[in-house]
Amino acid sequence: MRSFLKFFLASFVALFVFSILSFFFMLMIFARMGAREKVVVGANAVVVLDLSQKFNELRTDDPFRALYAGEAGSAPGLFDASRIIRLAAEDTDVKGIYIKADGNGNGFAASEELRRAVSDFRKSGKFVFAYAETLGQNAFYIASAASKVYVHPKGMVDFTGYSMTMMYLKGMLEKLDIEPQIFYNGKFKSATEPLREYKMSDANRIQTTSFLNELYGDFLVKVGEARKIDTASLHRYANEALVYEPSDAERLKLIDGLRYDDQIMDEIKRNLSIGGDESVNFISLNRYAVANGVYDGYSGNVALIYADGEIRSGADGENMIASDDFVKMIREARQDKDIRAIVFRVNSPGGSALASESIWRELTLARKSKPMIVSMGDYAASGGYYISCMADSIFAEHNTLTGSIGVFTVLPNMKGFFNNKLGITFDGVKTGEYADAGSVDRPLTDKEKLLIQRGVDTIYATFKARVVEGRKLGPDVVDSISQGRVWTGRQALELGLVDRLGGVQDAIDCAARMANIPEVELTTFPRPQNTLEKLMKSFGKEVKASFVKEELGEDYRIFEQLKKVRNMQGEAQARMPFEMLIQ
């Protein structure tokens, strides 16, 4: 008994001390946040655009960064970043932009948005220098818009063309005795291919070749215009592997020179007319935004709703489009009399067909009361297109991937896995023939397969009907451009799936014209989370993800694929292929 009391008291004291320390730690965090220094741009400022940073659609706040860096957020959103760059062009304190081009964490459409902002900045006459030790093609796409592009003398320049790789899991599932029972509609609907094929089908190869060539063609055109090199020559440089050393890139005029970091700093100082011993007043996009109040204000006459991630049913979906959450957001914007137009920003490969239908319904109601404009990001495909097709006007980037109008569902039969691999068997009773339909411990019967396929066909017909209604296209036309096929934004424009090419600002300008709004003030959704909630979620999520990645290493990608298979089990899906790795 005495030893029990000693153990209990020791545990209690430890818990009490930990609670007190945690309390004071949290107080320190909030004190630091409250005492955050006022950010001042200062004279001769150079804005830093770090391309290795991923710009999500919505601004991301990192409370831990706020603690040690005194910044209001760790990264601006994509539209925030483009606005910041354009604001800096008009700021007399800002003399130029320095692009750190070692890697690009952003997708093709996001890169186009950033590149356009850099090109607009250059019209101010200010300098834009891009520098990299290793210059990849995705980073070069943006960096080529700079007035000068430099690479480390012993670095690397990748100029070999684009490739796309998909991971196929059929062989692994066979070894595990797992049978994926797949039902789909649309001959190009390749989302289930990783489960039912060892390699690309002919139909998928056709569509992939088409959109990959479109993306690469856009890359060659933009780089060619910036570097004043014809696209045929650029294509030859890649096909003949003429860019092997950084000096090759300099000789072929792809870059302006080879420089070490100190030489770049000296050149920037000369442009600023400051002495060699003085330091350059570099300022990050985020600090510049804080200094200029870019993040201030959350009420206005145009609602900008960010729909970013996979589409799921339910609520409280972090980094996804949860149908209950978005129905509430859209309804709030619809019923708010101060909001006169809605811009719906979609960056999604799709997901649940049922959740897509729920969001489509609320958007359709909103469109009846005020202008509804859709702006497409890297992806607005399958379910992402489902929730876009009802808009008054749809904007996409040249290299947005959209369309993919098709439906599928997956029901795994794991009887062989349980019986043969684990030695587990199942038995039971039921009150009806189909009471256990869809159970993973047995295969589907022929009648059950027929019923499920009928359901998939019905959802696909509904999806196409939504497109016919929203886009004012004939049923035969929609059927011919559906079938699950993926299109680029430029192709979608030609087919009538989108109305215009452009970014978020173009969509906002269109909404303002339609609603006759002389001066736009934005209301952004989703609303920011409170700091404590974000702090706890951020900490828990990072710890869990880092632990799993450390344990699995390179197999983490397979783990992610299997998680997606599990999440879509038994529910009709309108989504793109699992993962397309384009390099």
Image (spheres, grey):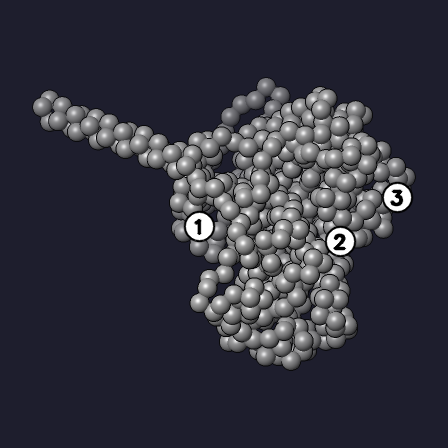
Q: Mark 3 — residue?
A: 477
Residue at horizontal 54 percent and vertical 44 percent from the top:
291
Q: In the rendering, at what x and y percent does residue 75 appear?
A: 53, 46
Distance of mark 1 from mark 2, alpha carbons?
Answer: 34 Å
Q: Earlier in the sequence, mark 1 or mark 3?
A: 3
- Would you call the spot at circle 3 few (<14 residues within 10 Å), some (14-19), or many (20 or more)? few
Q: Residue at x 62, y 35 (%)?
A: 321
Vertical relation: 255 (above or below) 451: below
Provide the residue designation for mark 2: 398
Q: Are marks 1 and 3 in contact (CB under 8 Å)?
A: no
Mark 3, mark 2: which one is toward the viewer?
2
What residue would you read off at disc 1? 549
Circle 2: element type: loop
Q: Quadrant of residue 348?
A: top right
| Quadrant position of residue 582 | bottom right
Q: Residue at x 78, y 27 (%)?
A: 370
Quadrant containing the N terminus is: top left
Residue 369, image x, y percentages: 79, 24
